[in-house]
Amino acid sequence: MDKLRIDKWLWAARFYKTRSLAVEQIDKGRVRINDLEAKPAREVKPGDTVSIRQGPSTRTIVVRGISNQRGAAPVAQQLYEETEESLRLQAVAAEQRCMGQDPAHTLEHGRPTKRDRRDIQKVKDGAWGDRWSASAD
């Protein structure tokens, strides 16, 4: 066997848990073969370059082997080789995630803190008093 459908290959190489997930991602345009947009039935062969966009990052992979069976992870990793450029970009992205701010520090919306609740209560009590509407009594 020297060629295989890209959806089967992505499933066998363990990039996606099911073939239907692989087909969905291919249909969304997140998979390219040799810089051409892929379709689920497009055949892939050893030596092809496959670009897979997963979240904010893109992985560039060279196909090394073909298998239409999903096997163990070590066997699946022998089906492809990630390019040096892709590995470098993955390392840079991981470093940026580690250096980024803690999401809790940037919270602007959501549940008010105890301090926010007290401030809201002061405004309610001070500005309107016991009146329930803005009209003058």
Image (spheres, helix red, strand yellow):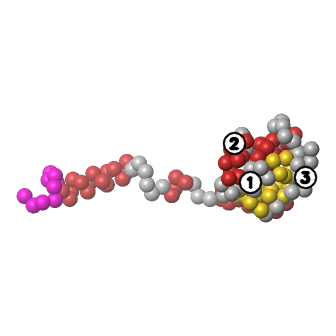
Q: Residue at x 87, y 42 (%)?
A: 67
- The answer, for residue 18, to whether it is visible in the render is yes
The prevailing secondary structure element of the residues shown in magenta is loop
Q: Which residue lies furthest to the left in this view?
A: 137
- Judge left or right: residue 5 versus residue 65: left
Q: Name the residue under label 2.
A: 20
Classify mark 1: helix, strand or loop: loop
Neighbourhood count class around disc 3 (C-alpha, 10 Å): few under 14, some 14–19, many 20 upward: some
> Sequence order check: which comes first, mark 2 or mark 1?
2
- Between disc 2 and disc 1, the foreground one is 1
Determine which of the numbered discs, if any, sits on residue 46 in the image: 3
- Please state the extent of the stretch shown in magenta in the rendering: 129-137
Q: Which residue is drawn at 39% across and 50% down?
A: 112
User: What's under tag 1, amino acid-wise?
Assistant: Lys
Query: Residue 123 placed where, x, y %?
Result: 26, 57
- Judge left or right: residue 64 versus residue 137: right
Q: Do the residues labelled 3 and 2 touch (CB within 8 Å)?
A: no
Classify mark 3: helix, strand or loop: loop
Number of dots carrying numbers? 3
User: What's under tag 3, amino acid-wise?
Assistant: Pro
